[in-house]
Image (spheres, coloured by chain):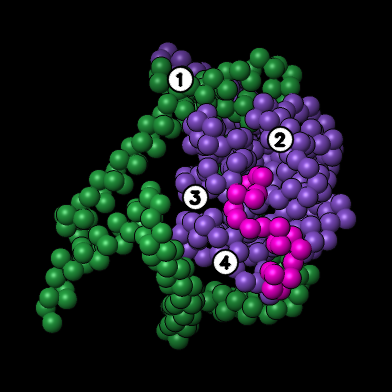
Chain colours: A green, B purple
Amino acid sequence: MSWTRSKEITSAIFAVFFLVSIGGYYTDIPLIASINTELANWVQIMLNIALGTGFIALFLYHRRKITRKTKGYPFSFIIFAAIAVMFVAMYSGPEVRGWLYGEVFTAMTTSVICFALFYEVSGAYRAFRIRNFDALLLMVSGFIMIINFAPLYQSVFPAFGAIPAWILGVPSMGASRGILIGVAIGTIAIAIRILLGYEKAYTG
Amino acid sequence: MNDMTMKVLNQYYRQIIFIAVLIGCFLPAFIPLGFPISATPLTVKAYNYIEELEPGDLVLVSVDYGPNAWAEIGPGMNAIVQHLFLRKVNIVFVSFVTDGPPMTEKLLAEIDLAGAKYGIDYVILGYIPGDEVGMASFAENPLKLTVDYYGNNIDQLDVMKKVKAIGDFKLYIPAHITGPEAWIRQFSGKIQVIIMTISPAALALVQPWVDSGQLYSMLPGTKGGGEYEVLLRKPGIATSIMDATSLTLTLVMALIIIGNIVYRQETSRAAKGGV
């Protein structure tokens, strides 16, 4: 049935859901509010199902890697072992789960994140070389923000705190507001484009 | 700087930097330096509000970060939640990310619960799926969940008997590393006061919401946690991390200055026709 694949149908479905959601947020009409609540429940149910399908996709992907012995396939065994261990741990009580999650998993992920610090400092050593006036501005603002995040300087030289506070409160906030307003206008523009059928990425 | 030093710095600068950073991070763990920490106005504002809460007041806390963000946010959350327990308020923990509930358990394992009992003084509701839709759903009806994280019926939990609507909470503390918009859209105006615990990297993004009054205050990660521990007079992990932060950032500034001296000498030598 070709009409089911027409873009008008997908646009109409989007329009109904969009208007009900907007109506539920901005109006106080009980019927629209209850429909909106029901739609929110649907989304939550679908996302729960998506978690399950995500797990199945992960399982199939790594099973395929192992059966085809593609590059790095031994790591897929580790994935399966980790899933099994965490699954058992989740039902073994808070102590086991807490130890694995808090002392093993958190420590490992924190370590990985912290590797970036070494490269960031190494990068800063080269990037903050004053080659021109722009680089000087970058270095000065970098220093001010470093001082802002090192409590030592704010305690020893309280006046230093006023400079980063001004940067965050005036130029940075102006830029942040600009970004926020820009994103909001962009989101509205995309919604209108989808409603009018110009944006095909979401409606097919 | 002599030629030998220049040569070493140019050839082995990465190794020197890595060793310096390593020393900066690890030295305070073995030799506490006790660098002074002073609380910034927003941290003081958050502290004062919690200090004025009455025992038994309802507070909602959403732990919306995973293990990868613990170093940035966890110590700050430890400090502020510690204060909540010391104030004897009733706390409802909820999470809008899958990692939230185990991170909540980690948080509670690391602080002094001041004799608080599960179900009577605090409860972990667990993960609510749907991201912002989940937040909207919870904000509309916090009693939509029928069981807590451990499968207990929430009707049987004393702390949940006090909750009738989202407006019953005197304070909401969300903790996350992303932009703050979703939390503000769904909870601002519904709960009187929101104090956000965020990654310091998101400071500039969150500042407009504080300025507009939609956020009462914010705690920028571990730095905010260190300041909060000073106000609490209860030094903890955030304070010890701040020693390492001050030392490492000082080393970073020193390295940047050295990098510029080396660069200047190189360029002036090249201008004179040297190699």
Left or right relative to B110: residue B146? left
Which three-letter amino acid code belongs to the residue tagged 3?
Answer: Gln
Q: Report the chain holding disc 1.
A: A
Residue A24's image quarter? bottom left
- Stretch of the chain drawn in magenta: B152-174
Say above or below: A115 vs B12: below
Q: What amino acid type should be assigned to the residue bearing mark 4?
A: Lys
Q: Does residue A17 lie above or below B62 as drawn? A: below
Q: Earlier in the sequence, mark 3 or mark 2?
A: 2
Contact? badges 1 and 2 (CB < 8 Å): no
The verdict on residue B161 being magenta is yes
The answer to whether the residues at label 4 and label 1 have Cβ atoms under 8 Å apart is no
Marks 1 and 2, how far apart in space? Answer: 38 Å
Q: CA distance from mark 4 to mark 3?
A: 16 Å
- Across and down, in percent, residue B215 comes to 56, 37
| Neighbour tally class for label 3: few under 14, some 14-19, many 20 plus, Cα within 10 Å | many
Camera sees residue B54:
yes
How many residues crowd mark 2 within 10 Å: few (<14), some (14–19), many (20+)?
Answer: some
Residue in view at x 79 percent, y 33 percent? B230
Residue B49 numbered mark, or none: 2
Same subunit, tags 2 and 4 = yes
Query: For the residues marked 2 and 4, what is the alpha-carbon distance in whole angstroms?
Result: 29 Å
